[in-house]
Amino acid sequence: LRQLRLLMESTALTQRLVGHDLRALRIRLVTPHHN
């Protein structure tokens, strides 16, 4: 049960980090077109 909870927590953390990276990447890709 402890391993499963750690796996779920690490997966949620990974999704959060990936989502943040994708958002930053999207901003980085979109920004040059406006400048």
Image (spheres, helix red, strand yellow):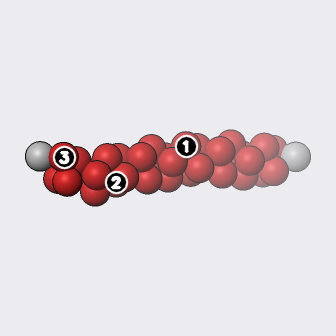
| Tag 2 residue | 25
30, 15: nearer the viewer: 30
| Tag 3 residue | 34
Q: Residue type at mark 3: give it.
A: His
Earlier along the polypeptide chain: callout 2 or callout 1? Answer: 1
Q: Which residue ends up furthest to the left in the rendered image?
A: 35
2, 15: nearer the viewer: 15
Earlier along the polypeptide chain: callout 1 or callout 3? Answer: 1
What percent of the width, then of the height, locates residue 29?
28, 56
Is residue 27 among the parts visible in the rendering?
yes
8, 25: nearer the viewer: 25
Q: Residue type at mark 1: give it.
A: Arg
**Residues marked 2 and 1 touching at CB (< 8 Å):** no
What percent of the width, then of the height, locates residue 6?
71, 46
Badge 2 local density, few (<14 within 10 Å), some, or many (20+)? Answer: few
| Tag 1 residue | 16
Question: What residue lies at 28% left-to-right and 52% top-to-bottom?
Answer: 30
Question: What residue lies at 11% left-to-right and 46% top-to-bottom?
Answer: 35
